[in-house]
Structure formats: structure tokens, C-alpha cells
Image: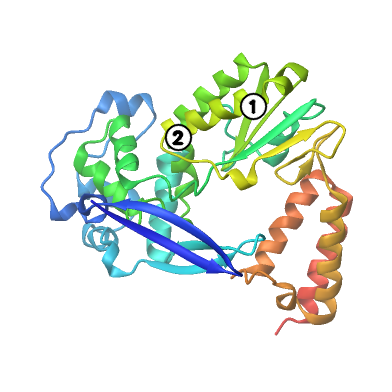
Amino acid sequence: MGLIIYAILSRGKIDAVAIRRSRKDYRSPFLFRRAGRPDAGKLASRGLPVLGNVNEVAALLGVSPKQLRWLSVADFGHYHSFLLEKKSGAARLIDAPKPQLKAAQRKIYELLLKKQPLHPAAHGFCPGKNVRDHAARHCGKQTVLGMDVANFCPSVSARRVCGLFKSWGYGEDVALLLTTLTTYNGHLPQGAPTSPALANLVFTHADARLAGLARRFGAEYSRYADDMTFSGGQAFQRKLSAFSKAVQGIVKEEGFALNHNKTRQMRHGRRQVVTGLVVNETPHVSRRMRRRMRAILHNAQRKGLEAQNRFKHPRFAEHLRGRIAWITSLHPRLGGRLLEGWKAARARFAG
């Protein structure tokens, strides 16, 4: 087994992602002869289709067996990799699937992953839940503790993904095939539509342990993707040090690590922020975020949207539109005004 280190240097800062990689993790399943019959009863209990061979998987995904074999081989260049700058000045490695593989991954999400139950604490990329629901659980608390899981998707190995599919009832051959379609270089790729759901599913056991730990300390727990939030009263505040060490231990035992640079302890007398929302009383967008969005759109109407793309986002206009939709869900009137500004900037510089 080898060890690959992705070291990304940006503005003097380095992000390192260590990925364990073995030949079994990323080679096409068609290079092996794997046995294993599906467990129909187990699959039916989860509402999953019984898939016993490549032809059945191909039919489910709406492709030919030949095309499926081609999609399952990572060496055929099914991903476009690029760096996306973070607000911190460091860079994030994005492995974005190309259209044909992305279409197959979307079907895997809709037909398999979306049906699987998650722990109630999970909120990010969960149907029917949103960032407001996550933040609302921590409103009006004496102390809010935010902790971040480092390299959330890349930390999930192909071996763990394969084990997840097998635990649902799929035979090893089909489990390995689904794994090669949803992983890249031995881990979940940051950029695939299946990665957030698979990371959530793998983290389910950790969610259960962390929720139990929070209850023992008289605290509330919820998670939005890699952002874990705990909150409670004075009793919880007095035990923060012991609690933080216990969280770190659970996360490590579950095969993940914390990004200690993003740990935040916020008491009620100061601004408490959870996933971008101020939660001292009710969830709302901060004044700083409102001013920033107004400034971006004001300047965009004079110089164009791309002139405001400081972090070189590949689809900045759509990204900005998504941020406006998020604000609209919390503050409809403000969101409506921001949307008008976005449309005006697009119309002025169209073509």
C-alpha cells in the first residue's frame, strides 16, 4: 500500500491531503473475478433494487454494459481536476466528473443513495433539511462550540465505500463496480454529486456516537457536511475542555480528523455564528454578509460579475445566484432586491 500526498501551495499556505491508495481501491472491477450474490431480503428492507451483475447495473443506470465498463476505469480520464481557492487563501483540490460519468453518478444518487436513512443530526445535503434547520437547533444557547472535520470527502476511502455497499446487501462484484463509479484515486472525489451523500452515510456511526456524547454532557449536536456544532448551558460550558477531547477521540476512532484551526467557542455575550448564520436569538444573515453581497452586486453592475470573482470560482454567476437563493430563504425581501441586482448585472454584460 502506498501513500500519496497532495500538497497545494497558495498564498503561502499549504493544504495537505493524505490518501491511502492500493491497487484494489481504484482498479476496474472487470480486472478481477469476484463472487458474491446479492442479499435480496436486505436490499428490499432498504428499498434498493437487487443488482447481481454488470448488465443489471447498466440497465439501472441507462447505459450499455460496454459503456459501463469504460466508465469504471479511472485511467480513461473521466475527471477534470483543478484548484479552487478558499477564503483562507489556501486552495481546495476539486475532481469534477465529466458529463457521462456525472450522469451515471446522479442516477446512483437518486436510485440508491437518496433512499438511505441518515442520522437526525445530519443536515447538509439531506433532502428536506437546510442550513437554517441546522442553525436553529443552537439558538439562544449559553455556549456554542463549532468543530470542523478535516478533508471530509477525501478522508473516505474507496475501501470504506465498498464496505458500505456490501453492508446493504450487494455482492462484492457489484459493490466494487459501484465503488469505482463513485470514487477516484482511492477516495471520494470532491466535486462528484455522489460524494456528499456517501460521506454522510459513512459518518452515520460517528453521528450516533457524537449525539450520545452530547446528551451525556447536556448539549445539542448537529452537523452540516463537515461542520459539527454543539451547544448547551453553563454546565456544558464548564466541561468544554473534557468534551472537546472526547469529540476528538471519537472522530479519530471513526477514521477522520479535526481541523483545529476552525474550532470556535462562542459565548452568548458575543456573536454566535453557525454555518454563516447568527444564532444568538433567531437564525439570520449577518450584517457583514449583507453588506458584502450588496457591494459585489453594485460593483458587478459597473464592471461585470467576473470582475468580482476573487476566488476564481469556475461558475461564479451560478455560485452567486445560489448564495442569493440561500439569503432569500431567510430574508425574502432582501433576497428579492439582491436578485434584481444580479439580473441587472447579467443583462448589462450579456453577450
Residue linked to disc 1: 241
Q: Nearer the viewer, residue 6 or 35?
A: 6
Give the quarter of the image for residue 241: top right
Tell me the mark number nearer the camera, choosing from 1 and 2.
Answer: 1
Q: Nearer the viewer, residue 42 or 180?
A: 180
Residue 203 in the image: above or below residue 60: above
Give the quarter of the image for residue 132: top right
Q: Secondary structure at mark 1?
A: helix
| Residue 125 seen | yes
Q: Nearer the viewer, residue 16 or 205?
A: 16
Q: Earlier in the sequence, mark 1 or mark 2?
A: 1
Q: Secondary structure at mark 2?
A: helix
Q: x%, y% of residue 9?
A: 52, 68
Numbered label tally: 2
- Residue at image x 57%, y 69%? 10
What's under tag 1, amino acid-wise? Ser
- Residue at image x 67%, y 25%? 240
Would you say 40 lies left or right of 104 here? Answer: left
Disc 2: CA contacts within 10 A as few (<14), some (14-19) or many (>=20): few
Q: x%, y% of residue 87?
A: 67, 61
Q: x%, y% of residue 169?
A: 28, 30
Report how far apart the C-alphas of labels 1 and 2 lie in the structure: 17 Å
What's under tag 2, amino acid-wise? Lys
- Residue at image x 45%, y 34%? 252
Residue linked to disc 2: 252
Q: Nearer the viewer, residue 136 or 12?
A: 12
Residue 190 in the image: above or below residue 222: below
- Residue at image x 26%, y 50%? 25
Residue 222 in the image: above or below residue 57: above
Q: x%, y% of residue 142?
A: 80, 25
